[in-house]
Amino acid sequence: MGFDALANAFVELALGGNLLYLAAGILLGLSFGVIPGLGGTTALALIIPATYSMEPIEAMYLAGGAMGATSFGGSVTAILLNTPGTAPNAATTFDGYPLARQGKAGLAIGASAAASALGGLIGLFTLLLFIPIARDVVLSFGPAEFFLLTVLGLAAIAVSVRGKLLRGLIAGGIGLMFAFVGFDSISGDIRYAGGINYLWDGIPLVPTLTGMFAISQMMELALKGGSVAQSGKDEKFAITGVGEGVLAVFRHWPVLLRGSAIGTIIGAIPGLGGTVAAFLSYSSVVQTDRDPDSYGKGNIKGVIAPESANNAKDGGSLIPTVAFGIPGSAETALFLAILVLHGMDPGPGILMHREREVYGLIVALTASAVGASIIGLLLARWLVLITKIDVGVVVPVVIAVSLIGVYVLEGRMADVALTVVMGVIGYLMIRFDYPRLTLVIALVMGDIAERSLHQVNLISDGNILGFMLDRPVSVILIAAIVITFLLPTLRRVMAGRRPG
Amino acid sequence: MKTMLKKGAAALVALVASATIAAAEYPADDKITFVIPYGPGGGFDTIVRSFAPTLESILGTTVVPENIPGASGTRGGQTVHRAEPDGYTIGIFNIPGLTVSEATSRDIGFSLGEITWIANLAEEKYGIAVKSDSPINSVADLCALGRSIKLSDTGGDSTSSITAVISFDILDCPITNVTGYSGSNDTMIAVMRGEVDATLKPIGSLAKYVASGDLRMIFTLSEETLLEGVETAAAIGHPELAKFTINRVVGGPPGMDPAVVAKLSDAFRAATEAAAVTDWAQTSGTTLNFKDAAATRAMMDDLSTFYLQYKDLLSQ
């Protein structure tokens, strides 16, 4: 039944104006991805009112096109300007930007395009395999597993900041403190809001991330002067690098597969999302590589890992959606909102009653993952020129566009003010060498960690560990946490034994 | 003195006349902004967007739904409260969420008592559901578990959570409210995973999972039987539990012209009877329940008094 529906959806894509909707979605997604502050959620939020007059299936092609294209768009800015276009691209800056500074932006963009497209396809293929057992998958992840996943994420943070553990812990601690600001969904109390109404809903992620990465990076660039690419005088090298980047993804296929697997799993967990997926994928490749010191200095695997995870998460985030009609990510929440707007009521019967729309979205996402990368590769030649523009031009444009982007999301000036504040904090963190992504990841996970631990405590009548050890998925996660902590030590011991 | 009185009377007549003219002209070509205190896609958003086209044709002017989410529906409420009382800004309110916030002395940035209530559009009753293969068949079974009943909910301040706390207090059965689930769907999946015993949710939300065979409804907080074979509040001798409902209430800024309010209220009445709206209500499982301005105000006062008596329980 599923494959018929899938085949029908592919046929339908070719009919009428559906391809146009898809193409419009991809272009919208790419542009929203490229612009810091704007992302997939903004694109979909803006699309929603426009879909009111459309057929639901047309809305799916438009939304799917945009959803699948933003993350690749965002990687372009991450690589070229060290400013992630969307939240999940933050990890791509670690190695993508050093590559751009070495004049190898084309190599990084090529790798990002191929990793995004292939990661997206793997994620969606996994989704199709999982559809028959999607319900069991969702039911085996409860509060205990959510909590352990956040611990795994925090463990990855702790070990990923090699050499500056204390600074990493401080940044993570500040992120956790930020996470606890606002409405406490457990007690119903407002915490640390200082009487400011704006803080009731907590410290929002998009302004924080835009400030931390876009604004602070522009401040850094402005003070340094010059242009992004330091050794990019030979333009031909940058252009030919694109194909090499694509090949690099195939050469490092284990990185691609692992990134896609991490992306799919994290995508399926509501609330975690692409930022955590990309970061975990990045830190796992650093941890397991023979030469961890080459990362952060322009290792192409450091681009492939986060970008494959980032796109694979879209397929994963549809697992809870097809199982129960619940969102796995902010984007799928908006996808469901589009269905609601068209008089449908998503629920456990979604795949039965809304098969056409669900498969339409899957096909749109598949086409978009590939389409966006092809468009990206075609444009790469011109995109890399951005790195050669004088910062006197780049800085004001990026700052203005980022702040407008943040404002557009909710229409709140307070978001713009917060972005600027976070920009200053981010700049200070660059100056004093504190990891910014650690703070952001802790901000994303703090709330989920606290909430799920509290739930496990109530559900298990206080016997938290006993409850977890009874659940197979929890046991696997506990093992993964232990391994994450032990791996660096094990590697040191192994290295010590190696002769020479 | 006489001239002063005359002048005063003339001024009054002029004022009333101008107000009447303004009301007669209302709505002029201006668009009406309909504030939704939550993001796109939720229950509040859906009902406003379903009413908007019908309202437009009845009132003969553009009705623009505007999402102003934030702070549990208070930000949208504040926007309406601050607007000019000219009938061109109205909003749907998070009731009884805001009523409970006021009852427990939480600052919501404005006073619900000052809002000009225009109409009540819909009302929904609550039900209690368990996992479909659960041995629990009634509220009595839940209370007989011999331990605190575990219920799943979104947040401690959500209306369903408040309803659960008060209802089980009335029934004298201890509960553990496991809050923190990210949406009402998640609370129902928590029941399916077996980590909680039951969940108390609007019947419309539970219905989807009951229809799919994942959950089983064991109780409705209503006086009449709503579902064949499912026990009601009246049947167990607690008809007062039927007082807990979710309302879709429309209001405007303080001090609106009564003539404009009447016009809007009539438009909402006509809309709740229009085929487009009744069709939507049927497919979405919404129970339309129109109340005019006066009845809505009385209902709001009633709700305030009702929740105020549980102030201490809710403040815990």
Image: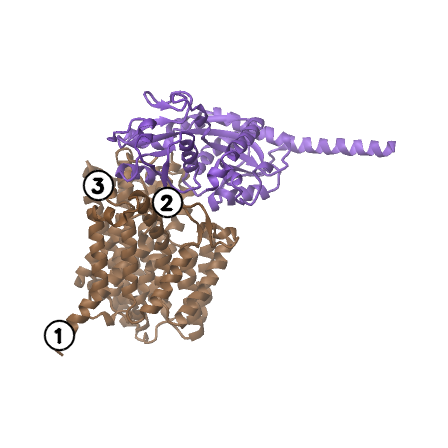
**Quarter of the rendering containing residue B192:** top left
The residue where tag 3 is placed is A136
Judge if badges 3 and 1 mark residues of a common chain.
Answer: yes
* Chain letter for the brown part: A
Name the chain letter of the residue that bears numbered label 1: A
Inter-mark Cα distance, 1 to 2: 50 Å
Q: Residue at x 59, y 29 (%)?
A: B263
Name the chain letter of the residue that bears numbered label 3: A
Name the chain letter of the residue that bears numbered label 2: B
**Quarter of the rendering containing residue B182:** top left
Instruction: Say whether disc 3 or disc 1 marks the residue closer to the N-terminus.
Output: 3
Q: Where is residue A167 drawn, in percent x and y? A: 35, 68
Q: Where is residue A324 drawn, in percent x and y? A: 28, 38
Number of the label disc, if any, that sits on residue A498: 1
- Identified by mark 1, the residue type is Arg
Q: Please tell me how crowded label 3 is: few (under 14), some (14-19), or many (20+) other residues with Cα within 10 Å.
A: few
Judge if badges 1 and 2 mark residues of a common chain.
Answer: no
- Identified by mark 2, the residue type is Gly
Q: Where is residue A158 drawn, in percent x and y? A: 29, 64
**Quarter of the rendering containing residue A11:** top left
* Chain letter for the purple part: B
The residue where tag 2 is placed is B180
